[in-house]
Image: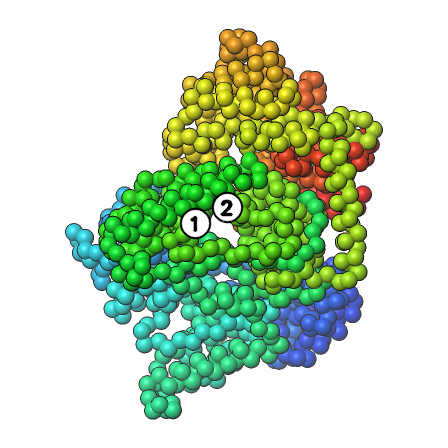
Amino acid sequence: MLTLQPQDAALDCQADSWQNALDQAAASLHKAGLVEASYRDALHAREAQGSTFLGSGIAIPHGTPESRDQIHRTGVRLLQFPDGVTWHDGNRVFLLVAIAAASDEHLDVLRRLTHVLDDEGVAERLAKADTAEAMVALLAKPKVKARLDAGTLCLGFPARDRFELALAAAARLRQAECVDARFVAAITEQEPVSLGQGLWLVSAGTGVSQPALALATPERAFAGPRGAVNGVFCVAAQGEAHRELLGRLADLLDSGEGEALVDADADHVLARLSGESSRTETARVTLLNAHGLHARPAKLLVQAAREQSLPVRVRLMEGAAETVSAASLTKVIGLGARRGQTLIFSAEGGGEGKSADGRGEGKSAEAALAAMVAAVNGGLGESVRPLSNVGDARHQGARRHEPNVSDAGTLSEAAYEPFADDTALPATAASPGLAIAPVFVMRAPSFDYPERARDLTPDRQGDAERQRERLRASLIEARDQLRALIGTAKGGDVSEILSMHAEMLDDPELHEAAFEGMRDGLSAEAAWWQAIDTAARAQEALADRLLAERAADLRDVGRRVLGVLCGVTMPTPPQRPYILVTDDIGPSDVARLDTAQVRGLLTARGGATSHSAILARALGIPAVVGAGARALTLANDDELILDGDLGRVIVRPSAERRDRAQLRLKELEALRRDAHGLRFEEGRTADGRRIEVAANLGNTAHAADAVEQGAEGVGLLRTEFLFMAYPEAPDLETQIGEYRRAFDALDGRPLVARTLDVGGDKPLPYWPVAAEDNPFLGLRGIRLALTRPDVLETQLRALLTAAGDRPLRIMFPMVKDVDEYRQARAIVDRLQQEIAAPDVQVGVMIEIPSAALLAPSLAAEVDFFSIGTNDLTQYTLAIDRGHPELSSQADGLHPAVLRLIQMTVDAAHAEGKWVGVCGELGSDAAAVPVLVGLGVDELSVSVRQVPMVKARLRGITWETARLHAETALAQATSQAVRDALEAL
């Protein structure tokens, strides 16, 4: 994000005219390497169109749209004129914020400037600032605002008393990252205070990171022992920032409209709390300006508001519940409205004129609002283009019973320009390969059903028992669907997650919650979704954000049953080759794919280690992920070139580019054929350096497939699959049978088994773990296993027994130092003596930075290291690989991660021990030479990637691998690493 920095500022500038000041601004931008020297003419041309004076002694000179080709990169420069400069519109300017805008990134800087424009003394302080740091501080320190928006509302919550509502509101604030667990604990100790009109209030100032106001309303209004309960407000107090929201709450109560909140949707609640009463006239309009309400269109909007006969206010539907005066330039710019977002204008009162129907009351308001809507639709002085059909549809809103829209959290698509032909769409490389095919955009269907059973169609109507029968039949059909998908699932990762979905269908608490709704008269559809949504909300509210993925699984299961109940099926892909474009993709979606037709995968969300990326690699489908919501605006049948090696997508490519891609595709297909034909050869570089290539397995059933694909062993067996498939811990004989199945299929090849790796983020129903603020940093992996040594001992005994005299490697997950390893190793040593297992090595996974930093002490005692690059990356970079915005940055080729790998390899080799990589980085085409050059001895990858990884090894030498490693380590960022490697 573009920010104001002291080095961007120039103090004590002098100018005898505004033209001279503008010339100095152009020179400053040119000297910084931001623009061509000719950009000076663009600054003057823009002033000729209208003054760029913003207010409070600040002007924001920038070029015209036609001058963007003169810009090298986006940036700003600050020029202070202590004596002031008289601008051509008569205003006195003390600070120029000169802008080189190659994109709209600079608009965030301008929006952050608006807070200073309400400060009457800021111009004088800017003129007197004697250091660049002081001046930037004046501009960059916005007033703290309390939060109130759709993300702080919890409406229709199935609570039984006002205390549960208070806790739900507090949990919503925590989910919105406004507060932490201390705040929630403080709220649980409070007695809600009555505000009247069935509304109650709780507040606390402990654990507040952002002041905010939350509202939780019940599913139905009820009467408690202290009176009616229509809703509970929860205040996260901090300084004075929250008091403005309390003032709005007081205004609502004074208006007597508090009772109306209980049945209101989020839009109406925010409207009331923004100050709009039942008498307020409102009008909505979608903003079409490419760069939103920046200074120029904002000025014209303000002019239109000032021309009206009564005050007009405006708020952003997607933003906070705050209306501002449409006649205030600083307030309008401060909204930060972007293309595709909705402006809501409001006004009250009547005027002199009469409308066509003869009514007088509110006519002036209607006319004023119509004028504002017309001004926005007219483009506010700019040429505008309509939104795409996809974006328009998204802004029409969702019906109540459309969980795919309201709960799936899909990214907004509306604020993006249509793609030009031959446009490059950058994203994250996820699964190697190249694809050329038309697009199929997959969107979830809508589920439309009545809430009450009496309103169903005659063939579905009936009492609670009839609804119960319908749900039972749908559960059976959904279970059969999942079993069929599991049987045909491509890859252990897919079948493992689908098995978990099948277990969720058998949850008796979900069934009982749905049956209870049916007894209250709900339809089977409404009762089932209410049970699913309540359980998912509870998961999200009471656990860490990292558990949201499990809530998403729960909703995925719920939609499957809902689809059966409603007779709705997923969109049918075309019966021809296509590239699948979707928000994200889960195991249910993957299991339905016809891999003979899917040429590639493009997702809006995700990173290189996200579920969608892992599943694509398991299927051998080229994939690019994390492309952003704009990818969802692609039209079906748009042709794409998708490069899963470089993370690039070309939309509607030119004939020349398509011909080049077709040639490369033929070369890749030939390489794959050759790789498959040579898959049983040993993994070696071109000059003979031995690198073992093994397979990662999520299920022992896939061991034979791994051998068939040329795997020289199993480098990672995720043993938790076995524990997640049973309602209680599997006994010794069950485990021996499963592990023996893998050893038999491997026929003497080594197997590396990771001991049970579960915990707060991957809980087992029979091994409950208390909710943790951050389960990824909590009780999981070896930490959890050591709390139940009996379970760990049974697993180790089963592995040793099943192996017999065949090569077994045991590794412990989530080890932070040698002490944890010693505790677990002692159990192995004791059992090995009892069983007399001859060929056993014991090692650890390097997935915590501390383990890499302490590798020398660990290497002295372990037999091997296996580097789990997925977790090592997210722990090193402090990026959750499932985060919707940051996951694309979780790149294992980041130089910090590579340095930890280098430290691990050096420590192991000093003790004569081997090192493997079992994370997704091992099959990354760009990473293979780097890992070899760092000295890694084994690469363990998804089964389908084994032949290609061997082929890549045959295409490099030790010398070129060292060059790749040295080049990567010399870079400062992961993108710089990839760029440098591509240039080699």
Occupied quadrant, residue 964: top right
Residue that lies at the very extreme toward the left in this rendered image: 225
Q: Is residue 339 above or below residue 611?
A: below
Q: Is residue 253 above or below residue 859?
A: below
Q: Position of residue 916 (x, y in %)?
A: 66, 27
Residue kind at label 1, given as amino acid type: Arg
Q: Crowding near pointer 1: few (<14 within 10 Å), some, many (20+)?
A: many
Q: Position of residue 374 (x, y in %)?
A: 51, 81
Report the side of 428 relative to 796 (left or right). right
Q: Are marks 2 and 1 in contact (CB under 8 Å)?
A: yes
Q: Which element type, helix, strand or loop, lies under badge 2?
A: helix
Occupied quadrant, residue 713: top right
Disc number for residue 672: none
Indicate which disc, 2 or 1, sits on the residue closer to the N terminus.
1
Please give the residue where the numbered disc 1 appears in the rendered image: 560
Closer to the camera, 216 or 219?
219
Residue ID at (61%, 77%): 382
**Residue 239 in view:** no
Residue ID at (48%, 74%): 285
Q: Position of residue 809 (x, y in %)?
A: 60, 20
Q: Which element type, helix, strand or loop, lies under badge 1?
A: helix
Please give the residue where the numbered disc 2 appears in the rendered image: 588
Q: Quadrant of the C terminus?
A: top right
